[in-house]
Amino acid sequence: MRKNIIIIVMLILSLLIMAIGYATFATEFDLIGNVEIIGDWNVAITKIEPIFVSEGCDASTVSFTDTEASFEAKLLKPGDHITYEVTIENKGTINAELTDSLFESDLSNSASEISYTYTDPAKILNAGDSTTFNVDVLYNADTTEVPSIKTKKIVGYFEYDQ
């Protein structure tokens, strides 16, 4: 029985020595990281202004926010037109790409004597760059009578994505 106790004690001592040896030669490493998003998305309308106005017409009512530009064009006679220039700026740090655009008007209840054309802004808008597009509204020169409906609503939509 004494021999069994000595063997048990020896086994326990062997285990302790092995544990101390493992702890001596084992090293634990910790990895601590901080992650921060530094990109800034900021594509915005920064200006709208009339760049051509036919004599006697009124293009003075313009306004804009970061995401919307609006104008009220008042045309006097057939052949008159007003051209507006809208500026879009990428004030962020992430490049932007034009992925969708659409211009339309309310055709069901609007003056057919009023037409419009527009140019597209840049497809790629790098960080820090700006682009412009024009909207030209025209009172049809071939009109011979004052129309009964005298207004047309024009809506343009542009979508930039990263």
Image (cartoon, rainbow, N blue to C red):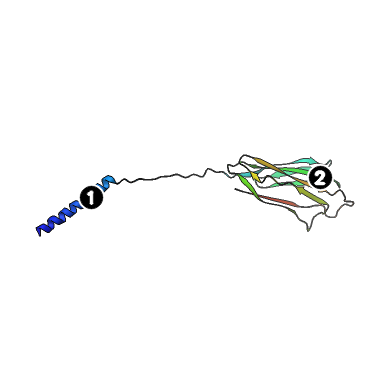
* Residue at x 63% of width, y 47% of height: 97
Report how far apart the C-alphas of labels 1 and 2 lie in the structure.
93 Å
Percent from the top left, x then y, of residue 117? 77, 48
Q: Which mark is residue 81?
A: 2
6 vs 120: above or below: below
Instruction: Give the mark, 1 or 2, whose residue is nearer the N terminus.
Output: 1
**Could you tell me which secondary element the residue under label 2 belongs to?**
strand
Count neighbours of disc 1 (C-alpha within 10 A) and say few if under 14, some if 14 to 19, many if 20 or more: few
Residue 63 percent location from the top left of the image: 71, 44
Which residue type does callout 2 highlight? His
Q: Position of residue 19 (x, y in %)?
A: 24, 50
Q: Which mark is residue 18?
A: 1
**Residue 7 in the image, given as x and y percentages of width and height:** 14, 56
Decide if residue 81 is on the left or right side of residue 4.
right
Question: In the image, what residue occupies the spot 64% across and 45% down?
Answer: 124
User: The residue tagged with tag 1: helix, strand or loop?
Assistant: helix
Residue 107 sits in quarter: bottom right
Categorize mark 2 by other alpha carbons within 10 Å: few (<14), some (14-19), many (20+).
many
The residue lying toward the viewer, choosing from 78 and 151, is 78
The three-letter amino acid code for the residue at tag 1 is: Met
Which dot, 1 or 2, sits closer to the camera?
1
